[in-house]
Image (tube, grey):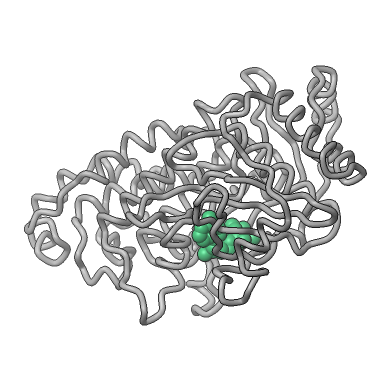
Amino acid sequence: MNCFSCCKTDVETSAYKKERSKYVSKGRRTFKSLAAAMSLKTGSSRHRQITAEILKYGTAQNDVKVLTYEEVVDATNNFSSDCLIGVGGFGNVYKGYIKSIEQTVAVKKLNRDGDQGTREFFAEVLMLSMVKHPNLVRLVGYCVEDDQRILVYEHMANGSLENHLLDIGNDKEPLDWQTRMKIADGAARGLEYLHNSADPPIIFRDFKSSNILLDENFNAKLSDFGLAKIAPREGEGLVSTRVMGTYGYCAPEYAATGQLSSKSDIYSFGVVFLEIISGRRVIDPARSAEEQNLIDWAQPLFKDRTKFTLMADPLLKGQFPVKGLFQALAVAAMCLQEEADTRPYMDDVITALTHLAVHKTEEKDIAGESLKIAGHVESFRAANSIGSERA
Ligand SMILES: Nc1ncnc2c1ncn2[C@@H]1O[C@H](COP(=O)(O)OP(=O)(O)OP(=O)(O)O)[C@@H](O)[C@H]1O
Ligand SMILES: [Mg+2]
């Protein structure tokens, strides 16, 4: 859910208006105006408009299909509750099967009225048409018949990271350390593609564990591009925007001023990575007051390396490499720095994570065993010194 609606601030500064007029003068319209235009149009002219809009922003990378309402109804057994696999801020999500393309899909049906929902719908269609990467969920198609707004994605057999990390009931095994690092690595690669390889570059803006989906082999793919923004190009300054996103995951400078940059995504990555390491939700009202906010809880622990192992998820039952834990915490700490400029870029994060994802757990490096070996601390010093910069 987008929980920032209570503190939305319109920060259309004059600098922003100047920036924006540059875009408009280049023929680029905002999604807001696109959404407004779209809602006045009927079926086929809407589709033509979407295609034209994609060409204006970049190049279509995907064969996103236009689906009829009938096809979607058929795929989901008329949105039967048996097919319901999730409920989000946008609407219900159903599992379905599209016969014409012989594909199992996830169908997201917009249940929100008003501009915001429509804007997010079209932003999602545009963004996902322009990007292609193994770590981004694929948009199979969409349906905009009459008042219906429906998005159809590839189905991700293991649902969201949130389901496996933070919402685990008795029916699921906790994720092991290697799988956690693999998921972090995949999600980081998706983000890195958006920042550095997508054309135009994209700021994701809603990076959180429920938006990281997992396939049958626990490969991670990012989903939910409704809030994504086209990043300013070199020398074009920051994007100023209404603060949207999910409370707890937003970078402090973005939450305070609406100044958005790709470094805001890096902070959100740090939050999710800390959730992955600790198994704790960024905001958890069920915990005692001093432990409700994950970042506040972690601050003092980051400063004391003897406490690092306390930050590991108890559900791991000590089955993690201590060296790997220290390095992972160092990466999280770098991403979570208050000062946006001092956070790393996603390619630096990937370099660090690639090592963690392939790091094999040796017996002596398992927590409990390894902690008895004084020498191992030396080898973590480099990583730890980065972590303590945050102090
Ligand atoms: N492509 C998909 N494949 C399989 N399951 C999916 C897919 N997309 C969404 N889901 C399931 O539906 C749930 C709801 O997703 P949705 O994106 O609508 O909401 P959310 O991410 O939980 O919250 P928000 O609305 O703030 O993004 C997810 O947590 C996931 O379990
Ligand atoms: Mg989502």
Q: Give the x, y percent position of residue 164.
A: 40, 67
208 or 164: which is nearer to us? 164
The quadrant of the rendering that contains the N terminus is bottom right
Query: Which residue sits at x=68%, y=37%?
Result: 126
Q: Give the x, y percent position of residue 121.
A: 73, 48
339 or 164: which is nearer to us? 164
Judged from this view, the residue extending furthest toward the front is 100
Query: Which residue sits at x=7%, y=58%?
Result: 363
Q: Left or right: where does residue 107 sit relative to residue 295?
A: right
In the rendered image, the vertical position of residue 161 relative to residue 193, given as above or below: below
Q: Give the x, y percent position of residue 235.
A: 65, 18
245 or 135: which is nearer to us? 135
In the rendered image, the vertical position of residue 312 relative to residue 46, given as above or below: below
Res 83 seen here = yes
In the rendered image, the vertical position of residue 288 relative to residue 320, given as above or below: below
Query: Which residue sits at x=83%, y=35%?
Result: 13
Q: Left or right: where does residue 295 sit relative to residue 74?
A: left
